[in-house]
Image (cartoon, rainbow, N blue to C red):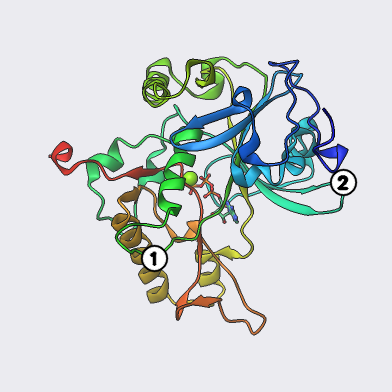
Amino acid sequence: MNTILPNSSLEFSGIGKNPEMSLEFSQFDDAPPEVTRRVYDVPYIEQSFDDGGVMWMTRYGWAWREHLAPEKWYHEKQYVNHGTRLTRGTGAVYRVGTAAADGRLLDIVVKFSRFAQDVPLHITVTYPGSIPSNLVDNSRFNSPFYEFGQLKAIRMPSENGTPRIMTGRPLAIYSPANHYKLWQLGRTQHRFNHYDRLLARDQQSVPEEQRLKLDMLRQYIVLFSWEKGEDAELAFLAGKLTGDQLFNMTEEVQDLLEQKGFYVLDNKPRHYIVRTRENGDLLKKDSKIAYSLIDFELLIPIPDQSALS
Ligand SMILES: Nc1ncnc2c1ncn2[C@@H]1O[C@H](COP(=O)(O)OP(=O)(O)OP(=O)(O)O)[C@@H](O)[C@H]1O
Ligand SMILES: [Mg+2]
């Protein structure tokens, strides 16, 4: 049947793993079990491409699936040739504009996951530094799926009435077909085993045919929505907020995350995107500067206190 999608350009090109399968359904929740995955409590639709690449789209990403197709941003290194490298962090991160056939535009953030790599020491310096130092010293980059799982948890309305936290939206995880040597990816078997075990434990609760595993020799790229504005440190340098405001914001983010049961091990103003209004002031919400939080590769649930001592 080929009638559900209103626009034939929305049909997916290749379904490598399940040649007889087609992704022709109009609602995320109508996806058949063959392409449904659930990882760290996040539901995904899995799309396998003829070239061996695989994409897992979240509910947010599914709404933009045409924009997320690898030929719109990945093939022929479009993220490099047509995108902008975001150099305010230490990883490989790009902003790329994508367009759908109907002219709708979407800017996405393309971020190469660093899981199973060493966390450079200078990344883990936290500010303000009230997170137990053993956690910071032993920090590991989240796997892409774990990162999206933690992000879902902090975005959920909390039972204890803590305010919502605005964040960039997790759209999809894409794993190109290429295989690399471990050293090319900066991973080690030993570090990878940790992620493998964690995921295997999580996947025990889903039917065997829907289980997901990480491939140690493949890259994983996380795709986020581009948040309009600039990061709070840049806003500070432009004189839009004071040093005190910047410090308070940083403390507030950490407090809020802690109330929700989480730490970001590298919490910093570069991870808050603020917006400037037409009159030059920063956008506020409930008389506080509004921000959208980004970068969740070091977002972790606060471990059980007894495990810390
Ligand atoms: N979703 C987004 N929306 C808007 N700006 C973004 C977004 N993601 C990243 N940026 C910008 O790009 C910069 C680098 O991104 P990000 O912090 O994710 O990279 P990183 O390599 O993980 O950095 P770090 O070294 O801090 O871990 C951010 O400081 C911010 O200025
Ligand atoms: Mg980071």
Viewed as shown, does residue 137 lie left or right of 140?
left
Residue 99's disc number? none
Residue 114 visible, this angle: no
Q: Is residue 274 above or below residue 303?
A: below
Tell me where residue 269 sits by quadrant. Answer: bottom left
Viewed as shown, does residue 98 lie left or right of 17?
right
C-alpha gap between disc 1 and disc 2: 38 Å
Image coords of residue 131 (percent x, y): 26, 51
Residue 59 visible, this angle: yes
Element under disc 2: loop
| Badge 2: residue crowd in 10 Å (few <14, some 14–19, many ≥20) | few
Tally of numbered tags: 2
Q: Quadrant of the N terminus?
A: top right
Amino acid on which disc 2 is placed: Ala
Viewed as shown, does residue 238 lie left or right of 255?
right
Q: Is residue 170 above or below residue 13?
A: below
Image coords of residue 53 (percent x, y): 69, 23
Q: Is residue 209 above or below residue 110?
A: above
Q: Residue at x 78, y 41 (%)?
A: 81
Q: Are marks 1 and 2 in contact (CB under 8 Å)?
A: no
Precedes in sequence: disc 1 or disc 2: 2
Amino acid on which disc 1 is placed: Pro
Element under disc 1: loop
Residue found at the far bottom of this picture: 279
Q: Is residue 299 above or below residue 19?
A: below
Image coords of residue 226 (percent x, y): 64, 54
Residue marked by disc 2: 101
Residue marked by disc 1: 163
Tell me where residue 235 sits by quadrant. Answer: bottom right
Q: Residue at x 60, y 43 (%)?
A: 59
